[in-house]
Image (cartoon, rainbow, N blue to C red):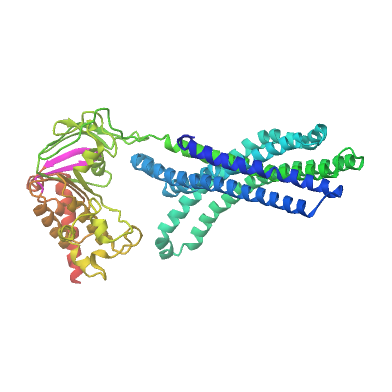
Amino acid sequence: MDYIRSKWYVYGFSIALIAAGNAIQSYYPRLLGSFTNRLEQGRLTHDAIVDYSLRLLAVGIAFGVLAGAGQYVIMRLGRLYEFDMRKRLFAHFTTLSERFYSKNGVGKLLSYVMNDVTAVRESISMGINQTTNATILILSSMVMMTLSDIPLRLVLVCVLPLLFIPWIVTRFGPVIRKRSLTVQDSLGKMTESAEEQFGGIRVTKKFAAEEIMNRRFGENVDRIRDNQLRLVRVSSLFQAIIPFLGALSMIVTIAYGGYLTLRHTISLGNFVELTLYIRMMAAPLQQIGNVINTMQRSRASLERIGDLMAVEPDIRETAGAKPLSLKQAAIRIRHLSFAYPDSEREALHDIHLDIAPGCTLGILGKTGSGKTTLVKLLLRVYEAPAGTIRIGGTDIRELTLESLRDQIAYVPQEGFLFSTTIRDNIAFFNRKSELDKVKRAAKQAQIYASIAELPDSFDTRLGERGVTLSGGQRQRTGLARGLIKDAPILIMDDSVSAVDAVTEKRIIEGVRRARSGKTTILIAHRISALKHADEIVVLDEGRIVQRGTHAELLARAGLYATLHAIQEEGDRDDEDQAVL
């Protein structure tokens, strides 16, 4: 309704055009009735035939031009709404937090953008067109019939069956809307399932699990079929009843009107005129059925869209949030404890940490120790308790999200690559980056040589999610994306785990040179990636259990020394296996 109100003058003009066209069309039976009377009375001349023909032609042209123009504009407005709504939905998606996406799959979100928006668009384009057509044609036909010589009681008797339509609408409307909502939900689940199946098709084929996937997808399709058939049954019954009432009106018209014509109570021209008006009203009645079906389905979709747009992001800026300008700002963490929503277990407990400007911090820990949780809180992907994390003395909750994340380059373990060129993937932060900068970042990430060997080098287009590259190449491409940003803070979240030890050493050395004087946070499972860090903290079950330099931690008994010994033993075994 906001959209329709914003375009009210265009909608009003278009509806007026459609209304004028249909009002003119309602003059058609009157002309034929008059023509029939003159024919019956033997007063039809050659000039009269030409005159009636020209007048009927004028009616047809006027209706086609006026109604056609109005319908075109309304259909165009519907398409513009569709485009605008999809952009609004996507913009809304970008504001929502990670927690939302952990509960809603891609397929479900695509269902909102594709199926629901299309359903609403149909209601404000085809729905408005048909509603205007039907309403004006019925009203103008009723007016023309009452202004003619046709007895009023005959008109009332003929249209009596049509008076049952409002009652039928109130009975069927809520049922259609409820079943439409069920269908849209099941379509979302099928889309989500399809997206998952397509994304994992390579795994499916490698495990020869096609039959399992076919059965799983088939179950979703069967569910949609059952829900669609339930909707079709009630919609078909509804759309059959309304035309039946129109046909019943026609039967009454022929029977009662024919009887009065034989009795000479009305003229043959009046009878022709009446039957044409009743017949003319049959099409609008069918349109009313279509419109009600469409409106009920779109209402269900609109409810889903409304619920989605009402979802508020978990992470929001406070009133008066300030922009962050880092330069040489320190990071200070005090009494940080955090548990994920819907979880009673603390992922982090009483963390105290100082990261001096320009230093390199290493974070080590077993899987599930809280390493990634810590950096997600720093990025405000999840919200830390007030006052627990400060940058430059300011609580990060008081900073604008854009400025905070603009000052941090985050490189996750599984960097997502887009289906575009390697150059665009690396220069994602700034697509206008010069090629020399892209190449420099690629060299620092030790991916330059691999890219240079590709047929189109940096202009090579990647498959979906970077499937063209190996796991290690995808990881290094993601690292190059973080390095080219040259942000004051770089976070590498186990982002060299998929490369061999030699390549890892070269990457770390390249990062050290490129990040001289800038803050770097390295998260890793392998100690070899953290040896050069100014300070290393060891996390275990959400707590800092050790901290110090590499040498200091090796000199003490504890988890760090234990992990180091295990990894050293594993490296020696790998070397022996390589020799064999």
User: Image quadrant of residue 406?
Assistant: top left
In this picture, residue 187 sits left or right of residue 258: left
Quadrant placement of the C terminus? bottom left
Residue at the spot 87% in from the left edge and 43% down from the top edge:
258
In the image, residue 462 sits, relative to residue 512, either above or below, namely: below
User: Image quadrant of residue 46?
Assistant: bottom right
One can see residue 485 in this view: yes
Q: Nearer the viewer, residue 332 or 489?
A: 489
Provide the major secondary structure of the magenta segment: strand
Residue at the spot 45% in from the left edge and 46% down from the top edge:
80
Label total for image: 0
The x and y percentages for residue 121 are 51, 44
Region rendered in magenta: 533-547
Q: Nearer the viewer, residue 159 or 244?
A: 159
Residue at the spot 82% in from the left edge and 51% down from the top edge:
44
The x and y percentages for residue 132 are 61, 40
The x and y percentages for residue 117 are 48, 45
Q: Nearer the viewer, residue 310 or 64?
A: 64
In the rendered image, residue 112 lying in the magenta stretch gets the answer no
In the image, residue 341 sits, relative to residue 361, either above or below, namely: above
Residue at the outermost right position = 263
Q: Nearer the viewer, residue 163 or 497?
A: 163
In this picture, residue 170 sits left or right of residue 519: right
The x and y percentages for residue 428 are 25, 53
One can see residue 379 in this view: no
In the rendered image, residue 544 lying in the magenta stretch gets the answer yes
In this picture, residue 535 sits left or right of residue 127: left
